Image: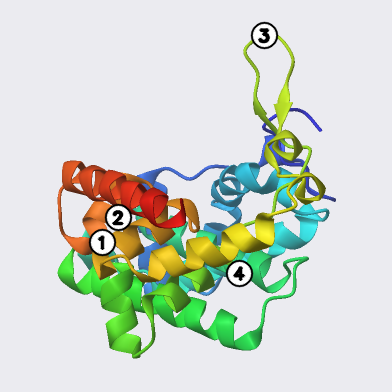
Amino acid sequence: MAKGKVDITGINTSELEVLSNEEMNKLFFKLNSGDKSAKEKLVNGNLKLVLSLLKKYVNRTDNMDDLFQIGCVGLIKAIDNFDTSFNVKFSTYAVPMILGEVKRYLRDNNSIRISRSTKDIAYKTLKLKDELTTRNGIAPTNEEIAKMLGIDLIDVDLALDSLKEPISMYEPIYNDGGDTIYLSDQLEDKKENINSWDISIYLKDALNKLKAKEKKIILDRYILGKTQMEISEEIGISQAQVSRLEKEAINHVKKMIK
């Protein structure tokens, strides 16, 4: 397979047609007038759009044919629900629907088994985020979502993290032209840390003594891996304030575990 190219069994992707906006509008007019053959032409004329969106997923599935079929399901849904009166390009409307179908398929077929309750929280969170973003023009924070669902913020964060694709221990994470550093090089060898159990107890006790906001920042930064900017947007303070609180919290923890 050529780099950046998606190969689909039985389809010569180089010969797929691409419809102009004018052709699209005419076909949608015919479809809305009852011409069912227009739908097939719309599907065939937008297959390259599906293929272009699948390029980023080439290394995340062993069967691109299946993923292409899923993308086509999203395309057909977009055609069925597209409203020409909104005066937006079809691709603008179709892309989120196609990607939505693809991402759902990849989540449901993840090699790591995620509990049903965690999946339910993740799906409810994504649905609420989509609905509120469409309605209000701004994405809600995870904290707001947690309140709406009546659950702890950490449950929402962990549910969303469960949807992320796992990576190999031998994934290269840095290379400056010399020796490559792999993820496995950054993992702790617990055999060399005899006191790790004691330290974890002291650390947990120290975290529980922090102020609520400081504890949240430390957990978000060093457990969930969030950036200071992401945290600042979630709790409604500046990135500089997050940085200051993080430093203060770390100093408090250091003092308590000495």
Tell me what residue is drawn at x 42 percent, y 42 percent. 20
Distance, label 3 to label 4, CA atoms, is 44 Å
Locate residue 228 relative to residue 104 in the image: left or right.
left
Q: For mark 1, what is the residue?
A: 234
Q: For mark 4, what is the residue?
A: 73
User: Callout 4, which amino acid?
Assistant: Val
Looking at marks 3 and 4 on the same chain, the residue that comes earlier in the sequence is marked by: 4
Looking at marks 2 and 3 on the same chain, the residue that comes earlier in the sequence is marked by: 3
Q: For mark 2, what is the residue?
A: 231
Tell me what residue is drawn at x 82 percent, y 49 percent. 191
Mark 2 or mark 4, whichever is nearer to me: 2
User: Callout 2, which amino acid?
Assistant: Ile
Q: Which mark is residue 213?
A: none
Q: For mark 3, what is the residue?
A: 177
Residue 92, percent across and down?
36, 53
Dot 2 falls on a residue whose secondary structure is helix
Locate residue 123 relative to residue 174 in the image: left or right.
left
Residue 26, percent across and down?
37, 57
Query: Is residue 243 placed above or below 207 in the rendered structure?
Result: above
Looking at marks 1 and 3 on the same chain, the residue that comes earlier in the sequence is marked by: 3
Tell me what residue is drawn at x 56 percent, y 67 percent. 201
User: Callout 1, which amino acid?
Assistant: Glu
- Sort mark 3 into few (<14), some (14-19) or many (20+) by Cα contacts within 10 Å: few
